[in-house]
Image (spheres, rainbow, N blue to C red):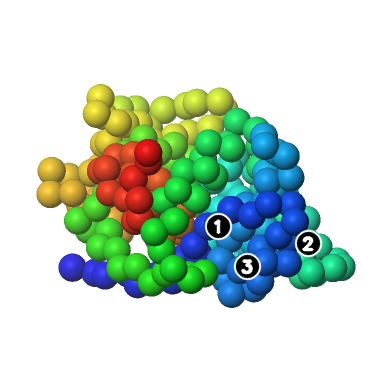
Amino acid sequence: MTISEVMRPIVRSFTPRQWRAAAAHVREAGHAVVWELPARARLLLPRPQEDDPMDLAHFSILDLGKQRYEVSRRGVTKGLATTLVPRDCNGIVRERIERDKVHNGATRKIQLDCSTCGACCYSNRVVLDDADVERFRQGGHPEFAKMPYARRSGGQVVLRLAPDKACLHLSPQNRCGIYAMRPEMCRVFPVGSECCLSARADELGIYDGAPPA
């Protein structure tokens, strides 16, 4: 059993008059959602470290389907990152806020045992790159990059899922059957990120905080 210990950010909601309080929360490593209008929210968070594959701020942005953000150059938010929340993602950030309302402080230490979870092995689009294909070949299983294990989708090669949306390589014991050869996307999946927490909630009904109202 391998336990991963992660210090994850707590997500809080702020009004347009609370930018100073929002910035203070983020400087303590939390994440803030500032509602500029009832249907217009801006995510404020520590500047992402894109060279760190486990950076939770970066993946909080990616989880909203975005990649771009701005770094503030002045005022109370100087040095912090901000990005506009897509309108169709307002519900997602509201769920984060609702989930974290039961927690105190700006961060929370959690422990996760990926070997007994496996939530990220469901309903995920795992794209194979050339290095993954070569890794399969060197591991003696070049067929893993072809049907019936993989298929072409949108010009990319992706792993196929079983009818229950599980990865075909996930064993009945909830273990990865190709762990030593697993694709790069699986290797860098950020434990404790919003992607991880939402997968646990959606697939297993496990909420690190208050469940949706």
Classify 72 as above or below 155: below
Q: Which residue is drawn at 27% across and 43% down?
A: 205
Image quarter hosting the C terminus: top left
Q: Which residue is drawn at 63% across and 67% down?
A: 26
Residue 4 point in image, percent of width and height:
32, 69
Residue 77 point in image, percent of width and height:
77, 66
Residue 65 or residue 87, whichever sits in front: 87
Considering every residue shown, the one lying at the far front of the view is 17
Residue 67 point in image, percent of width and height:
67, 47
Judge left or right: residue 179 versus residue 132. left
Quadrant in the picture for residue 14: bottom right
Disc number placed over residue 26 in the picture, else none: 3
Nearer to us: label 1 or label 3: 1
Q: Mark 1 and mark 3: span between their CA atoms?
A: 9 Å
Disc number placed over residue 71 in the picture, else none: 2
Judge left or right: residue 54 versus residue 164. right
The residue wearing badge 1 is 12
- Callout 2: SS: strand
Q: What residue type is labelled 1?
A: Arg
Residue 84 or residue 104, whichever sits in front: 104
Residue 132 point in image, percent of width and height:
44, 49
Q: Which amino acid does label 3 sit on?
A: Val
Q: Mark 1 and mark 2: span between their CA atoms?
A: 20 Å
Residue 177 or residue 199, whichever sits in front: 199
Q: Which amino acid does label 2 sit on?
A: Val
Q: How crowded is mark 1: few (under 14 residues within 10 Å), some or many (20 or more)?
A: many
Nearer to us: label 1 or label 2: 1
Nearer to us: label 2 or label 3: 3
Considering every residue shown, the one lying at the far right of the view is 74
